[in-house]
Amino acid sequence: MHHARATLREQGYRLTPQRNLIWEVLRDAGRHVTAEEVAAEVRRTLPDVNVSTVYRTLELLVSLDLVVETRLEGVASYYEVSPEPTHHHFVCTQCGMVGHFGDGLLAPVHDELTRRHGFAVGQIQVTALGLCRACRVVEDAVGAAADTGRQA
Amino acid sequence: MHHARATLREQGYRLTPQRNLIWEVLRDAGRHVTAEEVAAEVRRTLPDVNVSTVYRTLELLVSLDLVVETRLEGVASYYEVSPEPTHHHFVCTQCGMVGHFGDGLLAPVHDELTRRHGFAVGQIQVTALGLCRACRVVEDAVGAAADTGRQA
DNA sequence: GCGCAACTGCGAACGAGTCGCAAGAGCCAA
DNA sequence: TTGGCTCTTGCGACTCGTTCGCAGTTGCGC
């Protein structure tokens, strides 16, 4: 839990209340928060923390591999505390839910790129967009209701 | 080649020089151009074409499935004339080269999401970042030269 | 507790993209 | 060929996420 603080200190960075708080927010958030969300949460404790401080701190934490940045859909960046294994995301376009799946499923892609194209894969970003189980149920229910209505 | 124009007319949209030109630029560009690049290219013929016109036209072409939009890396959107099958991109972080690979390689991902997570996949966006064959050769050469230098 | 470099807050700026509006121009009908 | 209706355009101002420069503040080694 103190692992971020220790890392910061080890690398000669200062421990400030802002950095502490931003780190805690990320840890407690669970996963996938935008810089704005972090800022909002941080301000509940330290109201005067500036967005640029949040961005700078996130950048720092990313550079120290304590946090990973993901650009889902290219709209805004999302941050989360570094999870152990590489993983990818699927996002429900209805409710915004974000899920994970492992990198192992991309083995065929790694293979193809390496063997066929001589491409040295550094990083793969995958985002699947669609409907989560819960929203599918709702959609189906709505669809069924519409059908019933039509028949009546 | 007139297929875009025909589609526009069929759908009741007007054929303007700007739309014509933007479409031609996309066709001739081969692949993956940003809105800014399209605008720049268009302006070589019609200097007064506005960016918003470019954005609006691209949006229109996308909505008619004549063009696909891809958000590589979340930096800027790239546009290209609709290629037949769904495909994904790999981008050389050194030289910017963009390549394609088929959607079939993602079968395990589709499977996992559907079976394990009950997620109805609508669209998958994949971007692989790394080094293309040519840049790897250069890197290797540089590395080898450095080694030689070190040994001397 | 002192001093200095690292850090912060602020405000201005960025780049990509969007919007509202008035002027301009396709296209259809006469 | 000419209207004229309505779709398009150009313009400029705006948004949104993010970055930058700077002057003031503060953590922390001595």
Image: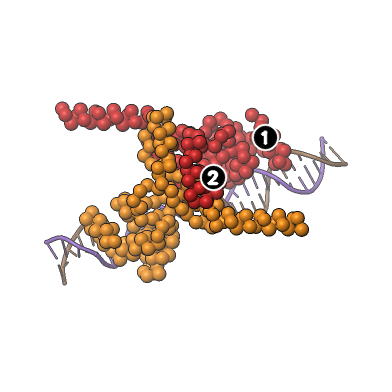
Chain colours: A orange, B red, C brown, D purple
Q: Identify the image quadrant of residue B54.
A: top right
Q: Amino acid at mark 1?
A: Arg
Q: Identify the image quadrant of residue B75.
A: top left
Q: Give the crowd class for mark 2: few <14, some 14-19, many >=20 residues within 10 Å.
A: few
In the image, what residue occupies the spot 33% across and 28% down? Answer: B137
Mark 2 residue element: strand
Mark sitting earlier along the chain (1/2): 1
Is there CB contact under 8 Å for labels 1 and 2? no
Q: What residue is disc 2 on?
A: B123
| Chain of the residue displaying label 2 | B
Q: Is residue B34 at all visible to an observer of this figure? A: no
Q: Nearer the viewer, residue A127 or B137?
A: A127
Q: Is residue A79 at all visible to an observer of this figure? A: yes
Quadrant holding the C terminus of chain A: bottom right
In percent of width and height, residue A89 lies at 45, 49
In percent of width and height, residue A116 lies at 42, 28
In percent of width and height, residue B61 lies at 62, 40
Mark 1 residue element: helix
In the image, what residue occupies the spot 25% across and 28% down? Answer: B144
**Given this view, does label 1 or label 2 mark the residue nearer the observer?**
2
Q: What residue is disc 1 on?
A: B5
In the image, what residue occupies the spot 35% across and 52% down? Answer: A83
Q: Give the crowd class for mark 1: few <14, some 14-19, many >=20 residues within 10 Å.
A: some
Q: Identify the image quadrant of residue B55.
A: top right
Quadrant holding the N terminus of chain A: bottom left
Relative to B17, A97 lies left or right: left
Relative to C14, B68 lies left or right: right
Relative to B17, B141 lies left or right: left
Q: Amino acid at mark 2?
A: Gln
In the image, what residue occupies the spot 48% across and 49% down? Answer: B116
Whether C19 is drawn above or below C9: the answer is above
